[in-house]
Amino acid sequence: HSVAVLGAPFSKGQKRGGVENGPKAIRDAGLIERLSHLDYPVHDFGDLSFQHLEKDEPYMHVPFPRTVGRANKLLSGAVSNAVGAGHTTIMLGGDHSLAIGSVEGHAKQRPDLCLIWVDAHADINTPFTSPSGNLHGQSVAFMLKELQNKMPELPGFSWVKPFLSAKDLVYIGLRDVDPGEYDILKDLGVQYFTMRDIDRLGIQRVMEVTFDHLLSRKQRPIHLSFDIDAMDPSLAPATGTPVNGGLTYREGIWITEEIHNTGLLSVMDLVEVNPDLGASREAVESTASMAVDVIASALGQTREGGPITQESQT
Ligand SMILES: N[C@@H](CC/C=C/[B-](O)(O)O)C(=O)O
Ligand SMILES: [Mn+2]
Ligand SMILES: [Mn+2]
């Protein structure tokens, strides 16, 4: 099958300028060229253009709700079309509020999808539990059926009907979870692996348990929502909410190689690359290059040159 690349230059899910330049930074790091070496056609759909609404007062302490809601409605349609056309779709962010549109649009085509959220953060605050009000820290709360009665009617989001069950979600890389998020994760029994869990179990076991949890009853499409801040800040410094003690390069690439090997990857988000936040040009380039490596390995690029075969895994 073919690959579609879709840029989403958007930043209003949080307050730090520059993340809207993420798609360009990732492209400038050679994404399309790298994907051209893989064995299927790549269609670059370019970048979506988002309207910034003039009147968009905060709701409670949540900034730009209508702008974020509108952007995600547009993105949902674009992702739905790309998946419907048979493409494995790569969405380049932009901040992580874009996952609302990306996963919702994917679920319109593949309602049986499961979601693997690789991130230092859980992004599962409601407007009531959020310490910042920033919607990039609330994305998952809009998706979950079990949180429907905990969510207010946010202006701009009436089009979003919760579509995901807590059992269809797994987190990998958590290390900065707010108290309200912790309560939600525990109440809903969400399967998650913190960085401590990864140190205890090792990344191979984490992926085995993840796939057993999500795929053992039946194989189904995977939505991988990869926040670049899951990686250790030494590897991805140019991002809005860096947290020490992140994934090593090899852990990050193990995750994406294993997801590729399921043959079930359908949509991948790569978000939160903010080229304005790198302390140097090298810092920006290493962050964007990390993003390209993560995407390329999720799409089949291997470290041993050819396809990863059974014997090479022994
Ligand atoms: N939990 C914090 C941080 C949110 C982080 C969002 B990110 O994972 O998309 O970077 C908040 O809700 O403000
Ligand atoms: Mn995130
Ligand atoms: Mn994050």
Image (cartoon, rainbow, N blue to C red):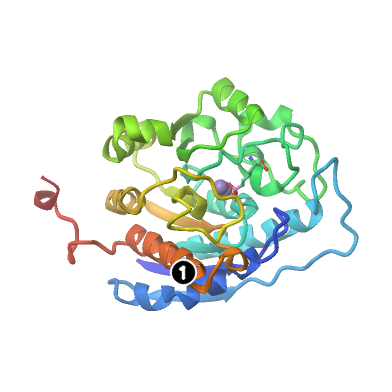
Quadrant occupied by the N terminus: bottom left
Q: Is residue 217 above or below residue 235?
A: above
Residue found 71% across the figure and 35% down from its top: 126
Q: Is residue 18 above or below residue 215?
A: below
Q: Residue furthest top?
A: 187
In x, y percent, where is residue 264?
A: 35, 50
Residue 87 seen by the camera: no
In x, y percent, where is residue 113?
A: 47, 44
Q: Quadrant of ligand 1?
A: top right
Amino acid carrying mark 1 in the image: Ala
Which element is circle 1 on?
A: strand
Say whether mark 1 is within 8 Å of ligand 2: no
Q: Between 23 and 99, which is closer to the camera in this rendering? A: 23
Quadrant occupied by the C terminus: top left
**Left or right: 296 as drawn, with respect to 312:** right
Residue found 41% across the figure and 32% down from its top: 196
For the image, the number of numbered tags is 1
Residue that label 1 marks? 4
Residue 312 seen by the camera: yes
Residue found 39% across the figure and 35% down from its top: 214
Q: Between 208 and 200, which is closer to the camera in this rendering? A: 200
Q: Residue furthest front?
A: 279
In x, y percent, where is residue 138?
A: 66, 42
Q: Between 214 and 94, which is closer to the camera in this rendering? A: 94
Crowding at mark 1 (Cα within 10 Å: few <14, some 14-19, many 20+): many
In x, y percent, where is residue 28?
A: 49, 77
Give the image quarter of residue 246.
Answer: top left
Q: Is residue 47 above or below residue 17?
A: below
